Image: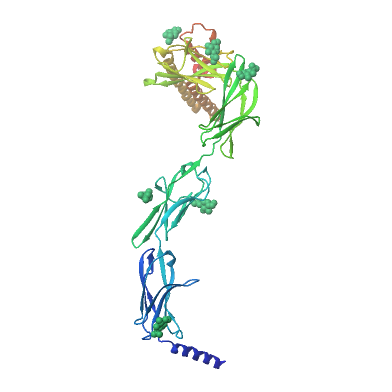
Amino acid sequence: MLLFVVILGLCCCSKESNQSPLGRPQLSGPSEASVKQIVTFVCELETYPKNEPILLQLIQKGNQSRVLGESTSLSGGTGSFVKEIKRKHEGYLECRASLQNNTSIEATVSDLHYLKVFVPVKGVSIVIKSGASEFFERTTLKLVCSVSEGTDVSYKWLMNGQLIASSRFHFASSEQLWINSTTSKDSGSYMCIATNHFSRTTYSSNSSQVIITVKDLVSDPEISFKVLKETSDNYTALVTCNSTRGTPPVTFSLYSNEQLVASMTREANLEAEFKVPLVLGQHMGFLQCRANNTDRITQSLQMALAVVRVGGRVTIHYETETGEAYSVVGLRLYCKVETGTHPEYQWFLNDTLLDGRGNFYYVVHQSPEQSMLRLSVDRRSAGTYHCKVSDIANTTAISSRKHYLDKEVLNRLPDLLVGFVFGCFTLVILLVSACCCAGVLFRNKQYGDTSVTGLEMVRMAAAYEDELDLSGYSEDADEMKTPREDEFDQASEASLEEWPGIVKQKKT
Ligand SMILES: *[C@@H]1O[C@H](CO)[C@@H](O)[C@H](O)[C@H]1NC(C)=O
Ligand SMILES: *[C@@H]1O[C@H](CO)[C@@H](O)[C@H](O)[C@H]1NC(C)=O
Ligand SMILES: *[C@@H]1O[C@H](CO)[C@@H](O)[C@H](O)[C@H]1NC(C)=O
Ligand SMILES: *[C@@H]1O[C@H](CO)[C@@H](O)[C@H](O)[C@H]1NC(C)=O
Ligand SMILES: *[C@@H]1O[C@H](CO)[C@@H](O)[C@H](O)[C@H]1NC(C)=O
Ligand SMILES: *[C@@H]1O[C@H](CO)[C@@H](O)[C@H](O)[C@H]1NC(C)=O
């Protein structure tokens, strides 16, 4: 065993010492080069036998090593290889030295030298990995910036000329751009710019613009209807379905008690109208709008298709607007009807219809529940007011009571109110004093009563101020041919009488 090792050692030693007159070549040259650049690699051999032709070869290592250049020389150990760099030259190079006519002497090789080949970026384009360039919101958009050639490329993404920063939903990394959960705000023109650098030169290439369109899903539609009079005894409901957002075309469908009634596709707007037969005063079932512009269907609430005829009392109440010194300068009259889903209101001054906007008033039909008449209080607006409510069938126009209004009447009210409130206040003070003076035994009980009374009075005063129902008197005002100037005074007195408690207390 020992012998074997010694023999092996001797063998090796003899091989080394035996080694040829050929030394190891040294390969030098650039470690990085750009394609088409002309570069020189130099292979130097220090020890070599004189008078023997020496073959130096530049070899590219790989699965199949390739000889890139050869140099034979009789007189020296230096070889130069001038090459025009190509993309395929990237990799490990070595120099191999051998004696041309003497194969008995083994060839020697240099250390490996790595050559990196730089390719300027070229041929940039955008590939839509996620598929279409037009799609619905909330899908993920994946774009890839592809280059036909280029090494060490870095990428920038622009949308409508603005650099895209990474955010919660925008993820730009190397050649990829992901936009998770797109919205219509992501619609625009996309471009990527690819750049790379070689020895202080920047190469850059732009892709062409790619237009991305993100469409909005249609929102839940709203449903409403209007009543149309077809003939004297025939009505239809004009049902409107409309959505606030969504990219057309949108298909709207009307369902009645879950049964499809009709559907239509709108190309330009987000509203559809359907006509449905209607019998006044009868419940015609529940209607619902559905809308879709994808496979996702949105729907409205269920709406009862029923027209309740107007009925019950028509009342007017008002709010005042005060100017300097608390004088009433403006007035808002509200007209309401007890029942009726589709009332139509009309306002009258001295039996003349007030419509739209005049020089001292305007009419706002705020909702089916009420209509407002806004007045400026002056000479022009003095007179007798009433409102009428009818429905589309117009067989039952109901009139409110008539109310006389002028500046004096209105301005008398606050004085009265001040007096009233002051009276109440004095009363409260008197009562509290009385309580204090009262005996310890009755104290708790009396105290309780006083505060309740106080509260009530304040509440009543508030009610009096806010919502004086002018129709609160007993006569049938419709029959009043000549309304008297003191109607409001009457109303005030009537109001006081409605709270006999206070009046009684006041008298005491
Ligand atoms: C070496 O070989 C080449 C051909 O292989 C021949 O032309 C040349 O003369 C030879 N040189 C010597 C010194 O033998
Ligand atoms: C986008 O979604 C993908 C897959 O759901 C996820 O891997 C990625 O992290 C998301 N990117 C961002 C920026 O949220
Ligand atoms: C590439 O895009 C940039 C940024 O929009 C612009 O400044 C540059 O002029 C474009 N270059 C070419 C060649 O279109
Ligand atoms: C009501 O009018 C519609 C259309 O105008 C018509 O189709 C329908 O037959 C009419 N119905 C009655 C009861 O007159
Ligand atoms: C309405 O009638 C009253 C008298 O009842 C009258 O004073 C007032 O000027 C009239 N107003 C209008 C606008 O005609
Ligand atoms: C109701 O009928 C009256 C006349 O009786 C008419 O002046 C009014 O315009 C009608 N209103 C509607 C809404 O048809």
Residue 138 in the figure: left or right of residue 375: right
Residue 376 x/y as whole percent: 41, 17
Can residue 473 be seen by looking at this rendering?
Answer: no
Place residue 329 in its image quadrant.
top left
Quadrant of the image where one finds ligand 5:
top left
The N terminus lies in which quarter of the figure? bottom right
Depth check: give the residue in front, 319 or 89: 89
Front one among 500 and 30: 30
Q: Residue furthest bottom?
A: 3
Q: Is residue 467 left or right of residue 121?
A: right
Q: Position of residue 201 (x, y in %)?
A: 34, 59
Residue 3 is at least partly visible in this image: yes
Q: Quadrant of residue 498?
A: top right
Figure check: 179 above or below 196: above
Along the viewing direction, whichever of 481 and 393 lies nearer the viewer: 393
Q: Residue at x 42, y 87 (%)?
A: 20
- The colouring scheme, among rainbow, by chain, secondary structure or one colour, is rainbow
